[in-house]
């Protein structure tokens, strides 16, 4: 099953977003689980986010995280996007996330982490839409 640990909820909202998303996953009879990853990242443009890890159907999770942004009137990260480059010589992992505020797309964030055990995500670049 595909997974991603680059979803996020505005700091202080992670627990209620995880609980709501897991309820929605159960209601729709989908396989998967959302949980807090225990990491907080900070962006200069969009603020702090609690990172969430999802294991299951990524398109379904992306849809839910946008709905959570609108439902709770918070900023969320819609993660799980890989760069289009087929092969990379970098020593780290790189993913992209969309930033939503109240259900609307407001920007993009590039996240990187070293390929070492226990490495944490960091913000490489940010862009408003």
Image (spheres, rainbow, N blue to C red):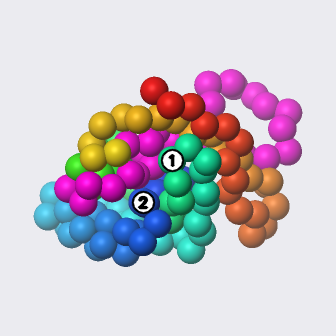
Question: Is residue 7 shown left or right of residue 116?
Answer: left
Magenta segment range?
71-100
- Residue 72 appears in the figure: yes
Which-is-in-front pick, marks 1 and 2?
Answer: 1
Task: Report x, y in % for residue 34.
Answer: 39, 66
Q: Is residue 79 magenta?
A: yes
Quick check: 25 above or below 12?
A: above
How far is the residue under mark 1 from the one under mark 2? 11 Å
- The residue lying toward the viewer, choosing from 77 and 45, is 45
Q: Are marks 1 and 2 in contact (CB under 8 Å)?
A: no
- The residue lying toward the viewer, choosing from 81 and 111, is 111
**Image quadrant in which you'd find residue 10:** bottom left
Q: Does the magenta stretch include residue 61?
A: no
Question: Is residue 44 shown left or right of residue 115?
Answer: left
Residue at the disc numbered 2 = 9
Task: Report x, y in % for residue 1.
Answer: 45, 55
Q: Which residue is drawn at the image coordinates 60% and 69% (left, top)? A: 39
Q: In which quarter of the image is the C terminus?
A: top left
Task: Report x, y in % for residue 15.
Answer: 37, 75
Q: Which residue is drawn at the image coordinates 24% and 60% (left, top)? A: 72
Question: Is residue 31 shown left or right of residue 88?
Answer: left
């Amino acid at each position: 099953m595909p997974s991603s640990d680059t979803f996020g909820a505005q700091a202080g909202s992670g627990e209620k977003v995880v609980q709501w998303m897991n309820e929605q996953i159960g209601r729709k009879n989908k396989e998967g689980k959302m949980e807090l990853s225990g990491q907080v990242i900070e962006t200069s443009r969009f603020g702090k986010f609690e990172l969430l890890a999802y294991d299951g159907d990524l398109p379904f999770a992306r849809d839910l995280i946008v709905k959570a942004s609108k439902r709770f009137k918070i900023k969320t990260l819609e993660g799980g996007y890989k760069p289009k480059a087929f092969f990379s010589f970098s020593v780290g992992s790189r993913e992209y996330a969309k930033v939503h505020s109240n259900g609307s797309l407001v920007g993009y964030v590039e996240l990187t982490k070293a390929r070492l055990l226990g490495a944490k995500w960091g913000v490489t670049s940010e862009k408003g839409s």
